[in-house]
Amino acid sequence: MSERGAPSDPGEEPGRVLVLNSGSSSLKYRLLSGAERLASGTVERVGEPGSPVAGHRAALEAVAARLAADGLGLDSPELTAIGHRVVHGGTAFTRPTLITDEVVRGIEKLVPLAPLHNPANLAGIEVARRLRPDLPQVAVFDTAFHATIPPAASTYAIDREVAARLGVRRYGFHGTSHAYVSREAALLAGGPGANVIVLHLGNGASASAVSAGRCVDTSMGMTPLEGLVMGTRSGDLDPAVVLYLARTGGMSLDEIDTLLNRRSGMLGLCGDNDMRAVTERLAEGDPDAELAVSVYCHRLRKYVGAYYAVLGTVDVIAFTGGVGENSALVRERALAGLGALGIAVDPVRNARGDTLISADDGAVKVAVIPTDEEFEIARQTLSVVSRTNRG
């Protein structure tokens, strides 16, 4: 295991990589040289009314100006490549991919699967390719790490012709985080052959079961709504609830969409989607906060048990993301009562937030590993560039 927060692998070859994460109204960036962060930041309110940043071109030009002011300009000959986060790769893109016109068209075809994210990702790609057409640019897909999930785990039990025609299957998300954290966690167990359960817990939350570096199951499905309880998303839900809300509740599809994605989860249960605020209320004896945390941790514990069964044996359970890295309460409650599986948390180590928080007599290591999605995107980008240069 590397020093906490320091990536274990600086990439396949040295070089500066600019990582871009283009959202609908923001542009996040990080400039890396190996494992060293040279610059990072966010341009916000992109394209919003009254914003000085009219669109993604203006946002990237603002990034270029910030980098130039620090002597790290976008036109620097030391810049090796640009890596782009793309949310949905469907079944067409199952690994990081050198961006070409054909690849752009392929990402456009996947917009119906990620209508809020892929168009914004494409806008960043379009602008970056115009500004640096000479530079290799790579798309790193959130879904790609989960492409190794076997059909038994990725297939929904609905009419197969309908599923095939509309692309209905489980894709999974947060893939760059799960890839990075599972690799770091495996080092705690002696190498890449380890079985790891990753719990990525932020406002969005997902779990994955990883065997010898390959994802074999994950909690998010066709969309990021499935799985764990999240900040504002419901997670797992009886599909008939949607029918009931429409038929009996008179709600439109858009209203149900808003309910399940934006007004559910921790927010729906107790009125707060910030775990820090919920924890403070819990300490004050608030019953709504108690219920919310109980539901949240119960769901987590169910997934840990399920993924233990999927993997057969577990070497490491890794917590990451804003909640996973910072909430000792969630870590403790999520794994409570699993001693029979060799899973036990040491309360002192957990309270300190040590890298290893498992008890000495626990057969399964429990770790807190800060994620680094930008580094993972840079690492995968350099890997693609290296393979391309080798022909």
Image (cartoon, rainbow, N blue to C red):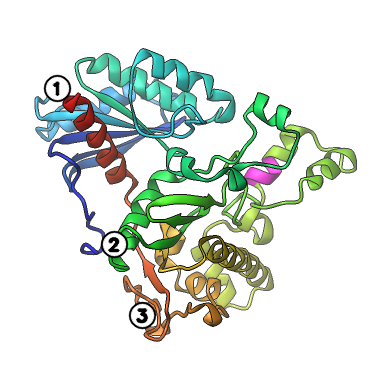
- Alpha carbons under labels 2 and 3: distance apart: 23 Å
Which mark is in front, 2 or 3? 2
Mark nearer the N terminus (2 vs 3): 2
- Mark 2 Cα shell of 10 Å, populated few (<14), some (14-19), many (≥20): some
The mark nearer the N terminus, 3 or 1, is 1
Residue found farthest to the right: 248
- The one of 227 and 43 positioned closer to us in this rendering: 227
Callout 1–callout 2 Cβ contact below 8 Å: no
- Label 3 secondary element: helix
Q: Amino acid at mark 2?
A: Gly
Magenta residues, dominant SS class: helix
Q: Which residue is mark 2?
A: 191
For residue 346, the mark is: none
Task: Assess disc 3: are there few (<14), some (14-19) or many (≥20) residues with their C-alpha within 10 Å of its C-alpha.
Answer: some
**Residue 366 in picture, x, y percent from top left:** 40, 72
Label at residue 75: 1
- The part of the chain drawn in magenta is 258-262
